[in-house]
Image (cartoon, grey):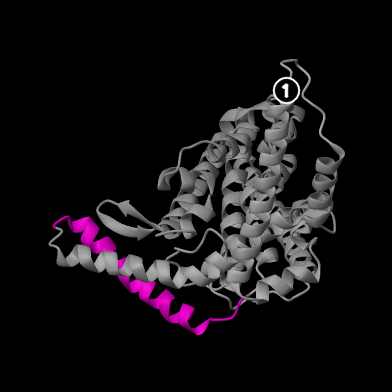
Amino acid sequence: MKLLRFMIRKDMAKSALISLLLALLSCAFLISVLRPSYAYGEKYMTYLKGDSETVSQDAQKLADEQNALNNEINDYQNNHNTGGVKQAELPVELEEKIIDFSQKNSQAGVGLDSMFSLIEGQLYAQQNSLKLISERVRGYSRNARRGVTDEYSLKLSDKLISDYNAVITDLKKSDDIIDTRAADGFENYMSSEILIPFGVYLLLFSIFSSEIQSGRIKSFGITKTGVRKFSLFKLCTGFVAVIILVLIIYTVDIITLFIYDTNGIKLDMPLQYLSGFELSSANMSFGGYLVAVFAAKLVYALFTASIVMFLSMLCRKTILAGAVCLVPIFVPLYLKTTSFSNPAVDILTGNYTNMLNDTGYMNFWGIPAREYVVYFAIIFIMTAFFVAGTYLLAERQVG
């Protein structure tokens, strides 16, 4: 155990430094995501807290003015087109109209059309989630009454009716209009965040390959520690480094979120208030969502770490390990950008957004199972598999 403590202390400074640098970079990225939503000043809150019909009317009025101006420009150019490549120059009166509309549609350098679109998205999630979920419950109830015989469908309907009824109860208690700009921005950033996987790669791609290449791991074979015990200690050291990485990055991001939201984060607001989560069956608050995201990212980071350390053990050269260990980092990122969307892909890529933003169940041998429960179970099993493989491979690689 003394050797394990020594190894952890030895690597902790490096892990903390890399984690802090990546956390500062993550903070900058998160701010860049949040900043555009906060460029409207007090006008934004005035519209958000006002009548939703006013927002729709003003947005439609602005769109109508834009369309009318575009039609006027097109009509003039069509009527004065001489057949050449160069289009007819606009008259001074029309250019002044364009300038006036541009100034009218600009608040703090950002278009009012963007502000209206953002507000309408927030209002839609908050004002329609109860209605949409209630309609779904009625639909599932009708299916049961109409004599649906598929056993899985009936089981799923029963679970979703129960889940959605609990969500409906909470939604009825929440009737305030909430500023969710920071929450929505945080969710968008976290769902596409790549710094944690990249940090895992930086910390661990050479954890075993460098020991094999230098011969240090082989030297432990003639000591009472032994190769396998040494490898087990290195595995523990790697996992500690990853835990430090996730803790530091996520903590800095959470602090940034709370500082940036000048209206105060509502941790008790329903998850369904987030844009894109209107039909979520998870009876979860935003505070619970933050905890769930941390757990999902930590577990997936440890899973990624187990693969990277296994490949590092498999590769005897550090340069080769550096190339091969990029595979478990970029393959999940690539799959997230494709059209593949099913529970298996969500689990293998750690796509917790898809696990929470809708029904959230998957067919697990004829049983409706919560996708995120299956996710944690499978990720734990696969992590254990790669850890065992790394441990058993140690003596063979240095033999």
Residue 188's x, y, as percent? 64, 54
Closer to us: 252 or 85 = 85
Residue ID at (14%, 63%): 146
Q: Is residue 163 left or right of residue 266?
A: left
Q: Quadrant of residue 333?
A: top right
Residue 391's x, y, as percent? 56, 41
Question: Relative to 90, is 40 above or below?
Answer: below
What main secondary structure does the magenta stretch of the protein show?
Answer: helix
Residue ID at (77%, 69%): 43
Q: How many discs mark residues in the rendered view? A: 1
Residue ID at (51%, 61%): 277
Closer to us: 181 or 153 = 181
Question: Relative to 395, is 236 above or below?
Answer: below
Q: Amino acid at mark 1?
A: Asn
> What residue would you read off at disc 1?
81
Question: Relative to 289, is 351 above or below?
Answer: above
Q: Quadrant of residue 390?
A: top right
Which structural element holds mark 1? loop
Residue lying at the far top in this picture: please name it. Answer: 84
Q: Is residue 305 left or right of residue 130?
A: right
Is 162 in the magenta? yes
Question: Relative to 329, is 9 above or below?
Answer: below
Range covered by the magenta-colored residues: 149-177
Is 393 in the magenta? no
Closer to us: 328 or 217 = 328
Closer to us: 349 or 271 = 271
Residue ID at (63%, 38%): 329
Question: Is residue 116 at all visible to an observer of this figure?
Answer: yes
Residue 301's x, y, as percent? 62, 50
